[in-house]
Amino acid sequence: MPDPRVEVIRRLARREATGPLARTLRASRPPAIAEALERLAPHERRLVLDAIESDEVLAEVLVRLDPATLEPALKAVSLDRLAALLDALEPDDAARIMELLDEEARAALLDKVEARERALLEDMLTWPEETAGRILQPLPFCMPPEATCREAIEALQQGENLEVVFYLYVVTHGGKLVGVVSLRELLRHPPSTRLDEIMTTDLITVEPETDQEEVAEIAARYGLLAVPVVDSDQVLLGIVTMDDLMDVVRDEAMEDMMLMAGVDDDPDQVSPFRRAKGRIRWLIFTMMTGMVIAEVIGRFQGPLSRNLVLAGFMPVVMGMGGNVGSQAATIMVRNIALGRVRLGEGVLRRLLKEAQVGLILGSFFGLVLLSWTMIRHEPPAVAAAIGLSIFLAQLNASILGSVVPIALSRLGTDPAIATGPLVSTFIDLATVLIYFNVSTRVFGL
């Protein structure tokens, strides 16, 4: 159920009612304020940001904004207040804000924060975007191997810089990660038990250069609430927590949805010209493929003129093939995203399963169309051509819809784009060729 304060904030900002706006903001939660900011014009957004009195609330609001809204919002906040906000933010959220600033503003802001905070931010900003290094929490809960459960619990109770604690990480005095202990195990054992006696040494870690989407896949595969990030010497640099991984999954899902539609950008965040420019290459590709299909159909005008029923069933065969291909491609993209299909691992098995689905669907709908055409008292050759065509078209669509995402992955391209223009146009072309070759060469129509 949407928060009613969102609409109240929007109305007050548009009326520039600063007094009631400030009172409403004090009574509103950060998610509601962020949602309202997403829907306001720039000058209205500035008014709301100025009316937020608490630095902690403003910090939480900013980290919830989309990049397209966050970047202009940061320009409406003074550097002095941004410096105060960085103290209220976790390092990964602070780094996200810092990377959106220009070099001059970033340098000026770093000069205003504490030396320890500045060192953490500078370290995180050295890692590439969308990697584990950019979203890690650099201050995980750590203890040495010889520490006891009692000492670990006391340290946890006294910890001031711990955001979310799911695990206790056991590190040597040099910072090398040697084990991990869940909080459940920590509480189950006697207080005098040493950590190296109960820690798990079969560690699942990632490097700071690991893509954030891969980190999310690893966390999902092994059921982890946090993933440790280590360097080449196994020194613990930090952890990537579940809340950050949920943001990654959400952002990647949105990106895949845009790519599946052949769109690179969020359509609500770009100008109409950029939206048109982003789609035009796919539309050109679709148009050119359509022109090829038109030429193919033109070469079979004779059979079409002699058997008009072939023309009537052509959209049915093409539509069914396109749907089956899109379904197969969507399933394959999902399997690739979840790590269930890796190049060279399980590919043939997945392709065989989709081919079996195509065989079943093709056989069923082929028999349905064959029977329907016979009931309409069409010549047996026409009925057989239509039935066999839809059988082969659906089998081909199942295989092609699965192969294209795998091929794109092998080429290093995001396979999400496969479920859009590529699969639909390729399958349409292949279906037309199957339909007319079966009709003319197999049944001589």
Image (tube, grey):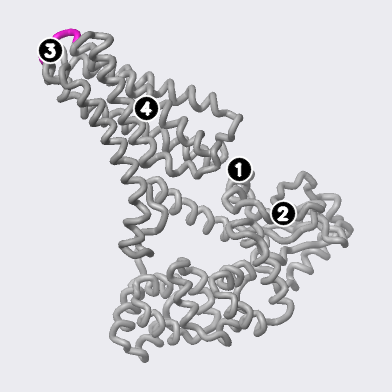
Question: Relative to residue 84, is residue 285 drawn left or right?
Answer: left
Give whichever of 230, 201 is nearer the camera.
230
Magenta span covers which residues? 376-381
**Residue 182, labelled with which disc?**
2
> Residue 423 placed where, x, y %?
38, 35
Mark 1, mark 4: which one is toward the viewer?
Answer: 4
Mark 2, mark 4: which one is toward the viewer?
Answer: 4
The amino acid marked with disc number 4 is Ala
Q: Secondary structure at mark 4?
A: helix
Counting residues from the start of the chain, the first of labels 1 and 3 encountered is 1
Instruction: Please report the residue visible at 89 percent of the width from the left and 58 percent of the height from the top.
Output: 146
Q: Secondary structure at mark 2?
A: strand
Q: Secondary structure at mark 1?
A: helix
The amino acid marked with disc number 1 is Arg
Counting residues from the start of the chain, the first of labels 1 and 4 encountered is 1
The amino acid marked with disc number 2 is Ser
Q: CA distance from mark 1 to mark 4?
A: 30 Å
Say which residue label 4 marks.
397
**Residue 221, labelled with which disc?**
1
Counting residues from the start of the chain, the first of labels 3 and 2 encountered is 2
Mark 1 touches mark 4? (CB < 8 Å): no
